[in-house]
Amino acid sequence: MPTTVLSDMKSNMEKTLGVLKNEFQKIRTGRASTSVLDSVKVDYYGNLSSLSQVATLAVPEPRTITISPWEAKIIPAIEKAILNSNIGLTPSNDGRTIRLNLPPLTEERRKEIVKDLKKKAEDDKVALRNIRRDAIDRLKKLEKEKSVTEDELKKLEKEVQEVTKSFEARIDEAVVHKEKEVMEV
């Protein structure tokens, strides 16, 4: 039973870390990345489809993203979806390809992004601590049911704390990596 509690806790912490890393991918840095467009949904024949399902995305230059739709007649729908997505980019097209030019980030904007990164990381650390608390509560419940001894409980609580610290360290690493990426000019 205690192994189930620990594996559930690790699984939940992995998910939390995965969500954070996914959010970090969407944050615009100084370089172009197609992951900025992951949340853009296009009205394609009455269905909302992700941009990658209706076009080919590419990064030909460090500050440019090109979108080559599979059908030229959906270019206006793609442009509308990009403008409505609030990612701060204005599309331009030549009749076949849509270009998104990423303006360079100002120093002030970079610092603002880093501040947001750190806030998201702190929120995820709080989520990790909540997962840790739930795991410890479940272990204490097992002790009351006499499934584990008091000594085993202390060892398990220590293990839970070590796992939590390792996940917090991984969050800190992700923040440092992304901060370095954002501050790079």
Image: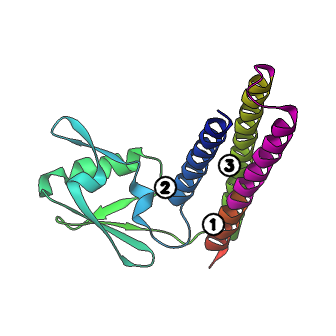
Residue, x 22% and y 59% (percent of image)? 55
Percent position of residue 88, x then y: 49, 55
Position of the N terminus by quadrant: top right
- The residue beneath circle 1 is 178
- What residue is pinned by disc 3? 120
Residue at far top of view? 145
Q: State which mark lies toward you, 2 or 3.
A: 3
The secondary structure type at the circle numbered 1 is helix
The magenta span reads: 144-170
For badge 2, the amino acid type reads: Gly
Residue 112 visible to the viewer: no
Query: In this figure, which residue is indicated by the disc labeled 2?
Result: 88
- Residue 69 appears at what percent x and percent y? 19, 59
Magenta-colored segment: predominant secondary structure: helix
What amino acid type is highlighted by mark number 3? Lys
Above or below, 25 relative to 40? below
**What residue sits 81% from the left and 39% below the top?**
152
Residue 70: % across, % down: 15, 59
The answer to whether 105 appears left or right of 126 in the picture is: left
Q: CA distance from mark 1 to mark 3?
A: 12 Å
SS at mark 3 in the image: helix
